[in-house]
């Protein structure tokens, strides 16, 4: 069996900034340096990987591409600490290392035939992107797809060009927002939970998936409840400081669940039972 | 010896004051002769309070150990005083903290306890390893009287007393709002004979000595966390960017850790000896701290934690400061 | 398997025989008893109570290399635990051996931890029964252990006065008996019964206890209970209770690079009682105070671990009670849990 602590080298095919600022977000499109890894690699939307550089460290990120996108993996990474700062220095042609796939995934098989609404904020769109991509690539298996997304400003929007493309397609209803008024902004102005109430998706035969800053998630969950969604219809992802990624080092637990191994994907019904879940 | 009823009465009076939020004192421990810190939040909690020679902890550490969470929207920060009981040695930690302007004097209410010496709990434990039920220790004259399991035993003071008490220069607290007992005159002095002994050793010999000690260190950081002077919000040990010290545990990093800590305490350590007391693997940390203490006293005629008006030694320059040790 | 005896006169000879392996035994460092690798049998200090630091570090080192690298080079070289060779831990207490058996479950859970498991495979545990409980704060019998417990052990020694009674418990233990065939003799016929009586007598001397029944199920319901604030009020946030715990297994992973560019990724013991343990890169800390950390420590041992592995991650060795600088006493906390 493979040593779960030894990472694979990946080469950066392309890298670009999604959002500027102190906490800028950079997307990396990578492929394995050893092409044979693709033969055994298999991930699902929701799965994560430990991403890092030997000599600097590792941190956990969701894989922000769907397995239906062949030949590459994507990671969208916000600059926050030592490791992410070092990763942000890298460009196409450089390489870094990943361990994975880790964690669980969104139960997309169970969701077949259902209407799906994704509600994202800021970098929280990263784990939702593969869900949307998966559904678009398996369009006949699912009902309606609605995308709700917001960030502080239009500049802070991740995946801007993709939203434009998605918005003009028939696959998906795309609802965008920014927190504060900007000139020539054609979409909603206000916080994501308000946009959710404006869009008011119907709970019948539906699943809502939400990711974003804790404050946003908190209000989104409340609003989904108002819209009639039951806790088992609502999914989110958690994050915590992680080191091993395989349920041993201890630190990422919320209650008895390890976010790295039992998560990152949880239903709200599961999390309601765990008082530490939103700490 | 402070009368326990008087102590509780005073505590009740203090914690009932509107401007006092919490009182930190001592209460009996969970087994044997142990005593432990008590956190009194209201007048009804005062019934357990004690002061005996088992009260070894330096409670001044808790003043700087307090965890301040962000004040919730719509709430006011609680600015009431924290009352704290201190022995003479412990009071010097408060003085040094205030010299360093760690907080304002009016944030704390100091209940001073003149003290004739506490026990070395490790010595008590070694002498009475089988005592589980609560025992009591009192100091009567030059003897400790230990009561347990319905019996009483007298043990000469020097057999069980903590080493630091044998060279205590300040048995009566140097800062207090209320003194809970009669002042105790200075009954001992410190000649640093132990440091002189250590200084005499050859370098190789010293290295072998410390190598054995530091190789046992497990880096639990109890010496740092218990220290009333280790209150940096962002400790050099915990920094990752840049990382000054590795977390790996080996003789090199362990040595770096203890040397760094000793340097950070030069001119600041007030000799409460808590670091050495709590070390689970018996590293004689006070030998390092006392070496610095003696040097600081010799070089600058300065004793940390003795006068709130003193500026911190290593952040001041005086024209008459000695320079002959500078290469 | 017939019981053997090892005369005390031959202990030195036996240890010399075993020192062809990596031999770990209790030894004195100044007055502190520590487990360490010994080459000279005279270093072994077998008349001890229990070691301050448990011998867990010989299965789970406090710092251990996962792989080596040179900065900029894609080649990563995993540490080969095999190189450490066969290890014998001689004279550990039954509680500490049982702790290893408990921690084994975690390291083979879903993902096998190759370093830990290889080292365990290479290690033979030779236990030393507690004829007298080493401390007033021992409570192994409350957790399903015993001063003469054999769980996790390959061989158990019992001090019978001028010799040790030797009982092989596993194949590894039997193999070790073969290695020591020149030092071992047949044990007197009535020793088995004698040892049983001694075990019962020693169990009877264990003075502290807790009824753990129902605690794992009850703990989650006490999440918001005021007891956590109270029991953690004096906590200094140091790592004594966790580092000295034979079942605590949490670790950090860090990279270390030398000026030459050579480096290693290694893991080291970490403690849930440290503030940095859970702090996010953003600065947010889901366990912001010692109250949350203490609650997690107790829950991890007495609720989460049994939820996953059907066993409480505590063996009642009493170290955390004996050495806590502020006398935080896990049995007092558990009593409060029971009473809450």
Image (cartoon, coloured by chain):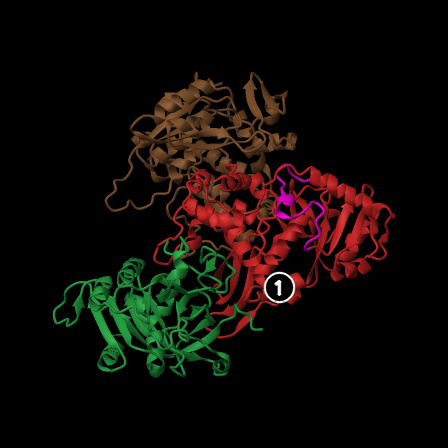
Chain colours: A green, B brown, C red
Q: Residue A184: x, y in percent?
A: 12, 72
Q: Residue furthest front?
A: A204
Comparing A191 with A17, the one in front is A191
Q: Is residue A153 above or below residue C201?
A: below
Output the chain of dot 1. Answer: C
Q: Residue B28: x, y in percent?
A: 51, 29
Q: Using a 10 Å C-alpha cutoff, classify the residue at mark 1 as few (fewer than 14 neighbours), some (14 to 19) or many (20 or more).
A: some
**Residue C103 placement: quadrant:** bottom right
Which residue has dot 1 on it? C117
* Res. B194 in view: yes
Can you say which quadrant of the picture contains the N terminus of chain C?
Answer: bottom right
Comparing B276 with A84, the one in front is A84
* Res. B325 in view: no
Q: Which residues are magenta?
A: C131-152
Q: Residue A149: x, y in percent?
A: 25, 69
Q: Is residue A193 above or below residue A133?
A: above
Q: Dominant secondary structure of the magenta stretch?
A: loop
Side of A242 relative to B195 (left or right): left
Q: Residue at x 46, y 59 (%)?
A: A257
Q: Residue at x 80, y 53 (%)?
A: C14
Side of C18 relative to B10 (left or right): right
C132 within the magenta span: yes
What is the secondary structure assignment of the residue under circle 1?
Answer: helix
Q: Residue C57: x, y in percent?
A: 61, 54
Q: Residue at x 41, y 60 (%)?
A: A270
**Residue A16 placement: quadrant:** bottom left
């Amino acid at each position: 069996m493979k040593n779960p602590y030894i990472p694979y080298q990946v080469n950066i095919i392309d890298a670009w900034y999604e959002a500027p600022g102190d906490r800028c977000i950079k997307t990396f499109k990578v492929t394995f340096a050893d092409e044979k890894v693709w033969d055994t690699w298999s991930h699902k939307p929701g799965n994560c990987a430990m991403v890092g550089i030997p000599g600097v460290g590792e941190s956990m990120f969701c894989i922000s591409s769907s397995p239906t996108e062949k030949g590459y993996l994507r990671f969208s990474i916000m600059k926050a600490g030592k490791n992410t700062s070092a990763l942000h220095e890298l460009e196409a042609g450089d390489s870094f290392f990943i361990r994975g796939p880790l964690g669980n995934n969104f139960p997309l098989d169970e969701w077949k035939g259902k209407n799906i609404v994704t509600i994202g904020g800021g970098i929280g769109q990263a784990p939702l992107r593969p869900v949307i991509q998966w559904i678009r690539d398996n369009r006949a298996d699912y009902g309606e797809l609605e995308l709700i997304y917001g960030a502080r400003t239009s500049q802070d929007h991740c995946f801007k060009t993709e939203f434009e493309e998605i918005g003009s397609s028939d696959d998906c209803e795309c609802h965008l927002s920014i927190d504060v008024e900007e000139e020539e902004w054609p979409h909603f102005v206000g916080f994501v939970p308000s946009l959710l109430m404006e869009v008011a998706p119907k709970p019948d035969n539906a699943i809502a998936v939400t990711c974003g800053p804790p404050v946003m998630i908190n209000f989104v969950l409340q609003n989904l409840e108002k819209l009639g969604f039951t806790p088992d219809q609502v999914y989110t992802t958690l994050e915590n400081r992680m080191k091993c990624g395989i349920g041993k080092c201890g630190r990422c637990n919320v209650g008895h669940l390890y976010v790295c191994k039992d998560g990152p994907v949880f239903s709200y019904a599961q999390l309601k039972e765990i008082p530490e879940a939103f700490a | 010896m402070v009368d326990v009823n008087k102590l509780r009465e005073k505590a009740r009076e203090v914690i009932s004051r509107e401007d006092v939020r919490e009182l930190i004192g001592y209460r009996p421990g969970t087994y044997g002769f142990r005593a432990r810190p008590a956190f009194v939040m209201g007048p009804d909690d005062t019934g357990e309070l004690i002061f005996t020679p088992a009260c070894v902890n330096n409670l001044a550490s808790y003043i700087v150990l307090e965890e301040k969470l962000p004040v919730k929207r719509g709430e006011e920060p609680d600015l009431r005083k924290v009352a704290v009981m201190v022995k003479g040695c412990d009071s010097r930690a408060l003085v040094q903290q205030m010299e360093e302007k760690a907080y304002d004097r009016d944030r704390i209410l100091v209940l001073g306890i003149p003290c004739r010496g506490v026990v070395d709990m490790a010595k008590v434990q070694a002498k009475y390893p089988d005592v589980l039920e609560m025992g009591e220790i009192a100091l009567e004259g030059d003897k400790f009287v230990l009561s347990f399991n319905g019996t009483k035993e007298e043990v000469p003071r020097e057999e069980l007393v903590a080493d630091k008490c044998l060279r205590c220069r300040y048995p009566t607290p140097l800062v207090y709002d209320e003194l809970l007992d009669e002042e105790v005159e200075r009954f001992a002095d410190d000649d640093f004979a132990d440091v002189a002994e250590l200084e005499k050793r050859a370098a190789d010999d010293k290295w072998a000595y410390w190598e054995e000690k530091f190789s046992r260190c497990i880096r639990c950081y109890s010496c740092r966390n218990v220290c009333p002077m280790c209150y940096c919000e962002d400790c050099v040990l915990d920094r990752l960017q840049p990382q000054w010290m590795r977390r790996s545990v080996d003789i090199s990093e362990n040595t770096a850790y203890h040397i760094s800590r000793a340097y950070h305490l030069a001119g600041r350590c007030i000799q409460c000896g808590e670091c050495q007391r709590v070390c689970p693997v018996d590293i004689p940390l006070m030998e390092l701290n006392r070496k610095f203490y003696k040097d600081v006293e010799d070089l600058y005629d300065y004793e940390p934690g003795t006068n709130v008006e003193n500026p911190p030694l290593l952040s001041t320059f005086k024209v008459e400061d000695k320079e002959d040790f500078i290469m | 398997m017939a019981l053997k005896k090892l005369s005390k006169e031959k202990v030195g000879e036996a240890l010399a025989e075993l020192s062809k392996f990596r031999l770990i035994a209790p030894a004195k460092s100044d007055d502190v008893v520590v487990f360490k690798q010994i080459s000279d049998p005279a270093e072994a200090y077998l008349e001890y109570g229990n070691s301050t630091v448990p011998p867990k570090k010989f299965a789970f080192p406090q710092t251990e290399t996962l792989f080596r690298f040179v900065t900029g080079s894609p080649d990563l070289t995993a540490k080969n635990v095999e190189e450490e060779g066969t290890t014998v831990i001689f004279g550990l207490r039954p509680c500490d051996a049982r702790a290893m058996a408990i921690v084994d479950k975690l390291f083979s859970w879903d993902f096998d931890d190759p370093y830990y498991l290889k080292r365990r495979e290479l290690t033979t545990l030779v236990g030393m029964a507690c004829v007298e409980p080493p401390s007033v704060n021992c409570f192994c019998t409350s957790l399903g252990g015993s001063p003469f417990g054999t769980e996790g052990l390959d061989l158990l020694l019992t001090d019978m006065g001028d010799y040790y009674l030797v009982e092989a418990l596993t194949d590894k233990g039997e193999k070790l008996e073969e290695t020591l065939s020149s030092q071992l003799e047949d044990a007197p016929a009535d020793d088995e019964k004698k040892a049983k009586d001694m075990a019962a007598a020693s169990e009877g001397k264990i003075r502290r206890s807790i009824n753990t029944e129902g605690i794992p199920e009850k703990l989650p319901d006490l999440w918001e209970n005021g007891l956590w604030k109270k029991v953690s009020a004096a906590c200094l946030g140091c790592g004594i209770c966790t580092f000295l715990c034979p079942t605590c297994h949490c670790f950090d992973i860090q990279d270390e690079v030398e000026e030459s560019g050579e480096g290693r990724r290694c893991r080291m013991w970490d403690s849930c009682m440290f503030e940095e343990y859970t702090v996010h890169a953003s600065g947010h800390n889901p366990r912001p105070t010692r109250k949350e950390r203490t609650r997690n420590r107790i829950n991890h041992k007495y609720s989460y671990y049994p939820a996953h592995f059907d066993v409480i991650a505590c063996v009642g060795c009493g170290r955390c009670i004996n050495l806590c600088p502020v006398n935080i006493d896990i049995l007092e906390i558990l009593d409060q849990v029971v009473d809450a």
